[in-house]
Amino acid sequence: MDDWTKQLPQAAQEYIKGRKLEEVECIISDTAGTSRGKCMPARKFAKMDQMYLSNAIFYQTITGSYVEIDDIEDQYTERDMVLTPDFASATAAPWAGDITLQVIHNVADQQGNMVETVPRNVLKRVLGFYAAEGWTPVVAPEMEFYLVARNTDPNQPIEPPIGRTGRKVASRQAYSMSAIDEYGPVIDDIYDFAEAQGFEIDTIIQEGGAGQVEINLQHGDAIKLADEVFFFKRLIREAALRHNCFATFMAKPMGDQPGSAMHIHHSILDSKTGKNIFNDANGQPTERFTQFIAGMQTYLPAATSFIAPYVNSYRRYVANFSAPVNLEWAEDNRTTGIRVPVSGPEARRVENRVAGMDCNPYIGIAASLACGFLGMKQGLTPRAAASGEAYNADHDIPPSLYSALAQLDECDALSEMMGPEFTRVYKATKRMEYDEFQQVISPWEREHLLLNT
C-alpha cells in the first residue's frame, strides 16, 4: 500500500502527525459487537493489501461455544475470509501504550463475494434495498450505559460506583449535573478519547439509573454511525478502566434500576434531491412517514431478537422503568415503543425506543431500517396514535428471547432483508445461548424454591 496514511481521515492523520505510528489493529465486528482481528506493526501493515481471518468467529455464542448447523457445508473447515482495509473508518486507539490506529476492514470470501454473516455487511445489504428505491437513510443512535463498581465475581450483584464524594452514586437523578460530576474524570476521558478519534458528541447526560449515562451522537450515514457506536463501546470501557470502575452495556445490569437502551432515530432522504421523504411540500407528514411507522409496528416483533439479543435483554421491558412494553406510537411520548420527537418538518423522524444497548449496532440499525422499509414497500397503515400513557396497552413486544426467535422463524420478508444465511446462523447461535442459560440455576430459584416446593 503506497503512502496509505494519505487515505486516512483527518482526525487519524492529525493523531499520528509528528509521531511514530507503532501498531495497526485490523478489526471487524463479531456478532456480539466486539472487535475481532489482528494487531500488527505498522511497517508490516504498510506492505499488505489484504489479510485473512477465519469465518468461525460467526459461529460462536457469547460464551465462546461453537454452534453446529447441519445445512452449512464445511462449517468446521474454518475457511479464511479476505479482509481489506476501509481507510475511511480508521481512527486512533488513544488508550494504547504505543501510538496505534484501528482500521475496520471490509470482508469478502475468496471469490470476492460479500460474506453474509458479517454484521457490517448485514447493514450494507439493508442499505442496498434502500438505494434501489432511491432512498438514503439518516440515523442518530443514543447510547445508554452504566458505570459500575468493579465486579470480578459473577456470583455477586452489580453495584453502583463510588463517586468523588466517597458515596455510592445515587439513582433517580436524571439530567442532574452534580450527579454526572460524581464520575467526572471518566467523562473527561471519554471526551478526550472521542476528540482524538474524531468523533463528535452531541450531548452527555445523566440518565435515571445510578451511574447511568447517555451519550447522543449527531445524525448521519448509517454505516458511519454504526461504526462510531462500535468504536464508542470500546472507548467507554477503556475510559472506565482508567478510573477503577467498569462500563457495562447490559440491557439490565441491576434489577432495581432502569435498563439501558440504544434508541435509534430514523429519517429517509430522497437520494437525488436530499429532501426528507417524511414531509410533503407543505411540511406535513407523508404516507411514507406513516408507512414507516406501520412497518415497525408490524415487523419489530419478528426483529426483536436482533435488537434484544440476550436473555437479559427482556428484563428491560418493564412498564414505568422508562422502557417500552409495546409498539404503540405517538408524538412526544416516551411511554411508547415508537416515538415521533418534537422537531421542525425538515427534521421529522421516527424513534425506535425498543432497541437495547446490548445489541450489535450494525445488526440493530439494519433490523430497525428493514422494518420501516417493509412498511413503506407494502403500503402498511399504522394503528391510531396513542394518547396519554401507553403502558396499559397490549404488550406486543415478545416477552423472551425464545418467543422472539419463534416470531422470526415465521417472517420470511425480514429474513430476506437481513440475509437468509445470516438469519439462519444468528437464530442457531441465539438458541444455543438460550439453552446454555437454561442450565444455570439462579439465586431466586434457590431462595424461593429450595425449601418451599
Image (cartoon, grey):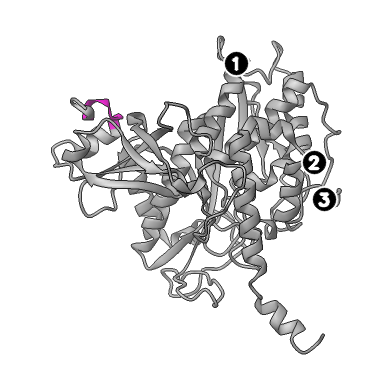
Tag 2: amino acid: Glu
Which label lies toward us, 2 or 3? 3
Mark-to-mark CA distance, 1 and 2: 30 Å
Q: Earlier in the sequence, mark 1 or mark 2?
A: 1
Look at the numbered discs 1 and 2 and tell me whether their residues touch, using CB distance below 8 Å.
Answer: no
Q: Residues within 10 Å of mark 1 (few under 14, many from 20)?
A: few
- x, y (%) of residue 176? 54, 57
- Confirm whether residue 203 shows in the render: yes
**Secondary structure beneath label 2:** loop
Please name whichever residue, 127 or 385, is drawn nearer the observer in this view of the structure: 127
- x, y (%) of residue 283? 69, 16
Which label lies toward us, 1 or 2? 1
Res. 328 mark: 2
Q: Which residues are magenta?
A: 5-10
Membership of 144 in magenta stretch? no
**Secondary structure beneath label 1:** helix
Res. 132 mark: 1
Q: Quadrant of residue 41?
A: top left
Task: Check disc 3 and report the residue beneath it.
Answer: 395
Please name whichever residue, 151 or 320, is drawn nearer the observer in this view of the structure: 151
Q: Earlier in the sequence, mark 3 or mark 1?
A: 1
Q: Residue at x 73, y 56 (%)?
A: 400
Establish if 391 lies above or below 278: below
Mark-to-mark CA distance, 3 and 1: 35 Å
Tag 1: amino acid: Ala
